Image (cartoon, rainbow, N blue to C red):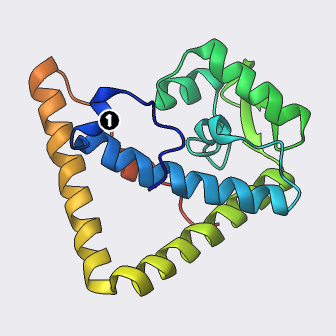
């Protein structure tokens, strides 16, 4: 686990909390994906752009829906989409359900990003199987799914409203 992003504070000397232990592997995997993307000529895609790709429906998605799914402001999402549009990863097309609205959808260049991401996920999975063993990886996955469910239930209990859908249910199907 890299400490290059972590602040040098007295709190760092305490045992790491669960959120940090979950965040650091995610960031390491994100760094691996960004390295792969840059090597394949997609250096314009940065970590924040994952909020667009992760929540984009195949047929296209309105910016407001992307923002809601990513839990960021509409303005922030619009900036991310504009950057990706300028670099040819997404396009805005009329929404057939409402001619005034526009949908964001992946272009062929954007679909290349999805293919590279799937390859990176497969490589990480193979690496973890080799490093930790398939049984531990299956157990880790089961524990993380259980954690996701438990925290979703806790959020619903605390707020009195249903919690947002778990990210694993929003995962894109293979293309």
In this rendering, position of residue 174 left or right of residue 157: right
* Residue 105, picture quadrant: top right
Q: Is residue 102 visible?
A: no
Q: Position of residue 146 (x, y in %)?
A: 18, 56
Expressed as whole percent of the image width and height from the top left, the position of residue 143 reads 20, 62
* Residue at image location 43% in from the left, 31% down from the top: 8
Residue under the point 18% across and 22% down = 161
**The C terminus - image quarter:** bottom right
Asked if residue 3 shows in the view, the reply is yes
Element type at marker 1?
helix
Q: Position of residue 83 (x, y in %)?
A: 82, 29
The image shows residue 172, relative to residue 116, as above or below, that is: above
Q: Residue at x 64, y 27 (%)?
A: 62
27 left or right of 75 in image: left
Nearer the observer, 147 or 152: 147
Name the image quarter holding the N terminus: bottom left
Identify the residue position indicated by label 1 in the image: 12
Tell me which corner region of the image, top left, top right, bottom left or bottom right, holds residue 100: top right
Give whichever of 42, 166 is nearer the camera.
42
- Image coordinates of residue 41 in percent, x first then y, are 89, 57
Q: At x 52% / y 38%, what residue is drawn?
A: 5
């Amino acid at each position: 686990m890299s400490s290059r992003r972590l602040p040098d504070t007295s709190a760092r000397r305490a045992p790491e909390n669960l959120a940090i232990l979950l965040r650091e592997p995610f960031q390491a995997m994100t760094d691996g994906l960004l390295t792969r993307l840059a090597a394949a000529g997609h250096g314009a895609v940065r970590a924040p752009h994952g909020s667009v790709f992760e929540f984009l429906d195949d047929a296209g998605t309105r910016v407001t829906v992307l923002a809601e799914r990513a839990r960021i402001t509409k303005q922030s999402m619009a900036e991310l989409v504009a950057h990706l549009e300028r670099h040819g990863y997404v396009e805005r097309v009329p929404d057939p359900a409402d001619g005034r609205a526009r949908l964001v959808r992946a272009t062929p260049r954007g679909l290349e990003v999805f293919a590279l991401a799937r390859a990176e996920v497969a490589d990480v999975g193979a690496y973890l199987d080799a490093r930790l063993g398939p049984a531990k990886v299956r157990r880790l996955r089961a524990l993380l799914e259980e954690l996701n469910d438990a925290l979703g239930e806790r959020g619903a209990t605390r707020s009195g409203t249903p919690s947002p859908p778990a990210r694993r249910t929003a995962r894109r199907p293979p293309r």
